[in-house]
Image (cartoon, rainbow, N blue to C red):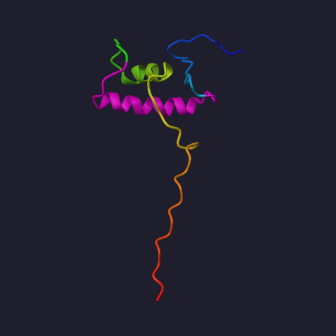
């Protein structure tokens, strides 16, 4: 039977506004945010952790990191062909 406790080795992660509760999306968004933090971005939360991954995961879990799901975004409208000259 799975353990529902949250421990440092068994982190239950989800994105609050994600209807699919995609773990993969959570990991990708948190990893990108961790890289931003490593590059000098300021954290959205006051933290005592020196690890950017921990801070990033907490920010994403709380919904502080905005992201766009490009798989469901509308495609750009098709471009109209350039007019050709008829001689």
Picture quarter containing residue 50? top left
| Residue 30 appears left or right of 74 | left
Kindly report the secondary structure that dominates the magenta region of the rendered protein: helix
The single residue placed furthest to the left in the displayed view is: 40
Is residue 34 inside the magenta stretch?
yes
User: In this orientation, which residue lies closer to the viewer: 38 or 78?
Assistant: 78
| Residue 3 appears left or right of 83 | right
| Residue 87 appears left or right of 41 | right
Query: Relative to 2, is 71 above or below?
Result: below
- Name the quadrant of the N terminus: top right
Image location (x, y in percent) of residue 39: 29, 32
Task: Please state the total of marks drawn on the protein image.
Answer: 0
Magenta highlight range: 19-44
Write the residue at 47% across / 74% down: 83
Write the residue at 37% across / 16% down: 45
User: In this orientation, which residue lies closer to the viewer: 66 or 37?
Assistant: 66
Query: Relative to 70, is 58 above or below?
Result: above
Write the residue at 53% across / 43% down: 70
Picture quarter containing residue 31? top left
Is residue 43 inside the magenta stretch?
yes
């Amino acid at each position: 039977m799975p353990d529902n406790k949250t421990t440092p080795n068994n982190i239950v992660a989800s994105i609050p506004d994600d209807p699919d509760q995609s773990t993969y999306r959570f990991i990708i968004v948190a990893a990108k945010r961790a890289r931003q933090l490593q590059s000098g971005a300021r954290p959205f939360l006051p933290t005592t952790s020196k690890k950017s991954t921990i801070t990033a995961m907490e920010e994403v879990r709380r919904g502080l990191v905005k992201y766009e799901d490009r798989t469901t975004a509308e495609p750009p409208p098709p471009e109209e062909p350039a007019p050709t000259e008829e001689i």
